[in-house]
Amino acid sequence: MKTFLQILAVAFYAQCALAQDSTTAELNRITAMTVALDGGGIAGFLDQTSSGGWKIPHIPSQWHVEHVAKPEEKQIDVAARVFGKALAKRLADESATMQRLPADDSLYTATVRLLDLSEWCAAVDGYGNAFLAQRCLDLAAVGVARLTANLDFPLEQCEVLLGRMQPAWLSAETNLRILNKDAGAVIFTTADREEMERVMGSGNIARRMKANPTLNADLESRGIAKGLRRSKAIDENLAFFDDTEAGQMRPPTLVNTWDKKTHGALVVGLELQSIEKARALIEFRKKIGAFPEKPDFSEEQISMREKRIAESASQGIKISRFEDAYRSPMAAAFAQAWRRYLESETSNVGNLPRQHQNLDAAAFQAYDEIRRHAFLDHDSAAEQQTK
């Protein structure tokens, strides 16, 4: 008859075997995803994730793997990070495709794929998951902007795409969960960007104070130390606040920063300028209906203006033309068209939010960049700046 200890031993080894089987199965799944990504590109990979019911693994930071992960977790975490980097490299290749495709249904399809992939990446709260999802959104913004600039492409379809570009995972609440999970401690307690930045900044100063007694005494004497956010979680996890310096990540592309520590980016938020420019372009086209190339003045208006300029010049007074205040005739045309629209909607334009008043500037910037083939995703722009 088996003793109680023998029964416990059998149960323990059975549990270990199950855990080992589970680890092996997950490693095989992640490996299969990596192979599929290498072989079929984004389109083929998405087909396989759908047919195979694949879910993205949780992808922690390299810092998490080295400082937080338990020994039994590291094997899967490392495999997930290898897959994530392979996906980041594949997305880097996709940037050229988003520039090369004509602004028609083919670009629309590629943009939809990127949005689908972004949602797939963000389905699990993870450090690497968030950055991959953001990268997909940034590339998709290029497609949305280029499609919007083509007046022959239905604006309604552009608006549908834009509607998918403000997902819930961009929220401070989601970023807080990701940060605490990756830190292995509840460091951030309030889902407010300003408060999260105060905590991150306080932790970084506290880390430097501990390492440098002279700095500690200086900050104490100036009363700065009293204003720092302090908690047991912060004091016990000072290493978490030591992000990689920007100068060590040139150009700061996702591939180059993948193995670095950039938790600060999640603190301030992953919102993208490319999306805001695409949003402005859509709104401008929706309200104006076209992209004017030069200001709209009648011959009579031009004649009167030139006469007034000449008369003033004879008296030593310089009067500028409307378009002289802008970088190009097209910029002036965008400003004129938007101002006329606003004045048709309200009698007090000055009371409108400044961002809405100046939407023409963002719309023109987007359209001008598209015309010059310079509307780029963040990583492509960063690479160009370092050349």
Image (spheres, helix red, strand yellow):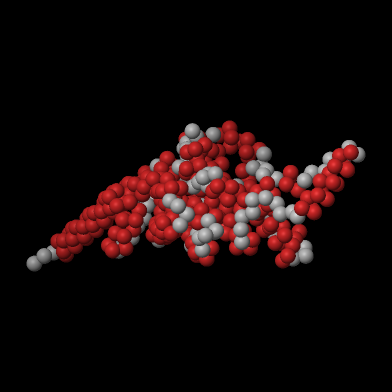
Residue at screen point 36% across, 47% down? 90
Residue at screen point 88% across, 43% down? 311
Query: Exactly how many numbered labels are in the figure?
Result: 0
Q: In which quarter of the image is the N terminus?
A: bottom left
Q: Residue 101 at x, y = what percent?
A: 43, 51
Image-based side of 373 in relation to 300, left or right: left
Q: Is residue 255 visible?
A: yes
Image-based side of 209 in relation to 34, left or right: right
Residue at screen point 51% across, 45% down? 373
Residue at screen point 58% across, 50% down? 366
Q: Residue 382 at x, y = what percent?
A: 50, 40
Identify whether 48 is placed above or below 303.
below
Q: Is residue 275 visible?
A: no
Identify whether 326 is placed above or below 4.
above
Image-based side of 242 in relation to 192, left or right: left
Q: Nearer the viewer, residue 213 or 189?
A: 189
Q: Residue 161 at x, y = what percent?
A: 49, 62
Q: Which of 139 and 11 is in front in this view?
A: 139
Q: Among all residues in the image, which is located at the extreme right?
A: 315
Q: Nearer the viewer, residue 323 or 366?
A: 323
Quadrant in the rendering for residue 290? bottom right
Q: Residue 258 at x, y = what percent?
A: 41, 44
